[in-house]
Amino acid sequence: MSIKTISYRLNLLSIILVGLPLSGLFAQESIDVSYSFGSILVHTAQIEPIAGNRVDGFSLTYTTKNKLGAQWKRYYNYPNYGFTYKYKSYNYPEVLGHAHSFTTFLQLSFLKRRRIFDLGFRGKIGLAYLNKTYDQDTNPLNTAISSHLNIAAETQFYSKIRLHPVFFEYSYGLNHFSNGLVKAPNLGINSLNHQFSVGYELENPIDKYTVPLRPREPYIKNEYWIYTVFGTKEVKDHDKRFGFVTMSLNYSRQISMINKLGFGFDFVRDGAATKYARENYHYSGTEDLNFRCGPNLQTEFLFGRTNFFAAYGFYLGNTDYYTTRAYYKVGTKIYFNNFFAIALIRAIPLFRAEALLFGVGYRINGKNPSPD
């Protein structure tokens, strides 16, 4: 039976089961094992020479016990979260080798009631070790990966059939490894994967509709915050790493229990910009191109102390030797009362990493987030 036939039948079963009058009971803590297969996504022509082979993998996942009392969780339909170890083989051992990754995940169900059938989205983020990297002399074809340690990210849409305590799942998604340009070249490697899982639930079903609802907390208004981030990046064919520093001034306002909107202004000192212009755009002037600044619009999705942050902006002034004025930032903020840590990927459209950034910040007129 072909994978298209299997997918069609699963989707048909999904439509049928969604219409059934299901109970509000569901389980959280579980373990499962998975097998996946797919192919490398050719996102640039330079990837084509190494993208012809099938990608195989297996994974082991633990979903943690879910504390239902946190107020923000009911706005996300009480998500599950946990940890995944994944092994991937690119079936090209002399060039791409294999990868080991360890990620945390957040699983969001699209359905209010999911005792027998579930349908939703899962996002993963963590670290990966790839055993084969770019080398000008011994492995010049691998322009996708140039460092052993990389960021691991994965998005999946899943459908699950639960026959408590056993469940079966099919998912389809995109897996991504890259180092955020800490070391060059860094085109990154993406693969589209079909995944089949079988799991075992370790706790009895819980009725989420019996969870007491707390009074709604007041929104955070007129919140001012500042952060500075530090990072490194590399220019191709140069072993030296260049420093990257950003100072960011921001204003945001909470518009719902789970979302803030705002704007900011970034001041960037990029030690690689002048070198990059000389190497790639034949810049011969004496002006220092390393300084940039510009505004951005931003959003923040609230998950207790750990929030998802994204911003999109553009640089002002002379940008003749930059590939684009536009840039975006995406990552996480972890709060410690009014202080917070922030980890971001700064990139230029579309999906090309420019720098990997880590920083600290402070907010004014905020309030302590929920400890959950």
Image: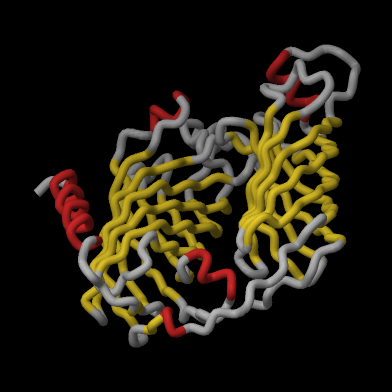
Report x, y in % for residue 69: 55, 81
Residue found at the far bottom of this picture: 204
37 versus 122 height, above or below: above
Report x, y in % for residue 134: 53, 38
Report x, y in % for residue 251: 81, 49
Which residue is drawn at the image coordinates 28% and 64% (left, top)? 160
Report x, y in % for residue 217: 68, 72
Which residue is drawn at the image coordinates 78% and 58% (left, top)? 221
Residue found at the far front of this picture: 215
Which residue is drawn at the image coordinates 77% and 63% (left, top)? 340
Is any part of residue 343 visible from this angle? yes
The front one of 34 and 94 is 34
167 versus 17 height, above or below: below
- In the image, taking residue 279 as reference, residue 366 lies left or right, namely right
Display colour scheme: secondary structure
Residue found at the far left of this picture: 1
Quadrant for the C terminus, please: bottom right
The front one of 39 and 205 is 205
Name the quadrant containing residue 370. Answer: bottom right
Which residue is drawn at the image coordinates 39% and 36% (left, top)? 41
Q: How many numbered discs sit on the rendered protein?
A: 0
128 versus 216 height, above or below: above
- In the image, taking residue 145 as reference, residue 288 lies left or right, namely right
Name the quadrant containing residue 287. Answer: top right
Is any part of residue 35 visible from this angle? no
The front one of 174 and 299 is 299
